[in-house]
Amino acid sequence: MVIKRATACFLVLSILLAPCVSGLKRRVIRKQAVLPEDRGYNNAYESETLDSAILPVTTRGQRPLGVVIFTCCTGDQEKDSLLDSLLSLKKFIFEEHDYYPILLLNDGTITASDLAKYRRVMNPSLILEERMSLDVPAYLKYRMPPLRIPEHLFGRTVKERSLCRYRAGEFLRIGVLQSFDWFMLMEPGVRILDAFSFDPFVFMESEQLDYGYAASGFDAVETTAGLWDLTQEYFLHEDLPFAIPERVAHIASGSDYDRSTIYPAFEIAKMSALRSKLMYKFFSYIDWSGGFYSKGYCAPAVRQLQISGFLHPDRIHHFRTLPIQYGPFLSPPLGFTEEEVQRLRKKYSEKYGLVFGPDEHPLFAIAV
């Protein structure tokens, strides 16, 4: 009799607790699904919806809805470089064509006094500010087996590698960007040296392009160790056609592809192209691998593979003739003849006092 009552009680408890156990299983399964080794990247796009906050934007006439984005800063020197970039942007694009909003993404390093200084040199209403987190994501910090994150890698701190990750794709999750159709991404230290003969946003829209860039040079193959294999793995995993080597050669204006990275002095892109599901899933795949922190992958390398893998070559434009200084380098016009290069070197060395150092690369100008 006691056994029958115990059995009956057990059956009643099983029925009552079934939904709870089922829910617990679902939570465990969901938790397991986001582990890197299980390729939880596949759910990243669907489960982590992009922010949908809308910022009211006023426009003059029918100009494109564009925004200039700076990600900043890892130190005081970079904040000073940002001011130089803003001044050159104002003089050679805005005053020549039209003014566009400027979004400063930072982790709190830009103070109220810094912001006031930037607003004094620009139209105050144009300067927008948004905070970003440069912490290592929790799903990488607590993954098993533990991810080894060196304090310094290729001269970059952990914070600087977080900034690389942010520039590679995380910034596209900012809700305010949904108010815009186009963005130009620049870094502090990029300085425009001469007037643009065209409005870059108008040019991209009128030519029906998705992505444009001005190259500033190439990085060593070592900084992308493992990224190429990871990319091939992703294309096989997603059953996608793999034509990246030919596409990369195309965007490099015919140079041989050696798995090194083209560093852009600036990028300009159609928001919908880079926020597409294909683009974001690829970024998530690379992100979940932990390579930004453990191997030092940089944003330009990931972007180069994104645009060459998912955009048609005819919708990619290389701004070959724009004179832009990026750190110590003058943007090299890939494909120029030696005579054309020498003419540019002479023009800007006289105009800005750039001193050309030893010709490790004949297109680079060393700014002193």
Image (tube, helix red, strand yellow):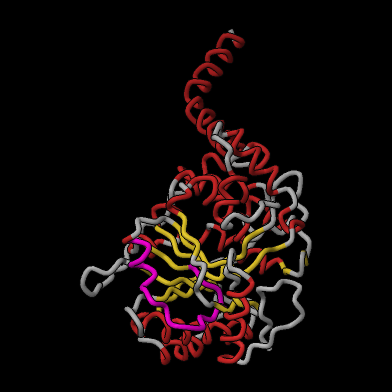
The region drawn magenta spans: 185-205
Q: Report whether 281 appears left or right of 153.
A: left
Residue at x 41% of width, y 84% of height: 90
| Residue 136 x, y percent position in the rendering | 65, 60
Q: Is 149 drawn above or below residue 88 in the view shown?
A: above
Q: Is 268 drawn above or below residue 329 in the view shown?
A: above
Residue at x 35% of width, y 83% of height: 96
Q: Report whether 290 appears left or right of 41.
A: right
Q: Which residue, as the protein is rendered here, is positioned at the far left?
A: 61
| Residue 123 x, y percent position in the rendering | 35, 86
Asked where in the image residue 56 lies, by quadrant, the reply is bottom left
Quadrant of the drawing holding the N terminus? top right
Is residue 141 in view from this perspective? no
Frontmost residue, 233 versus 16: 233
Asked where in the image residue 269 lies, by quadrant, the reply is bottom left
Is residue 11 in view from this perspective? yes
Frontmost residue, 55 versus 352: 352
Residue 362 among magenta residues: no
Q: Is 43 drawn above or below residue 296 in the view shown?
A: above
Residue at x 61% of width, y 10% of height: 3
| Residue 221 x, y percent position in the rendering | 74, 56
Count the labels in the image.
0
| Residue 215 x, y percent position in the rendering | 57, 66
Quadrant of the drawing holding the C terminus? bottom right
Q: Is 167 drawn above or below residue 129 in the view shown?
A: above
Q: Which residue, as the protein is rendered here, is positioned at the far front?
A: 339
Frontmost residue, 251 versus 81: 251
Residue at x 63% of width, y 54% of height: 138
Q: Report whether 199 appears left or right of 225.
A: left
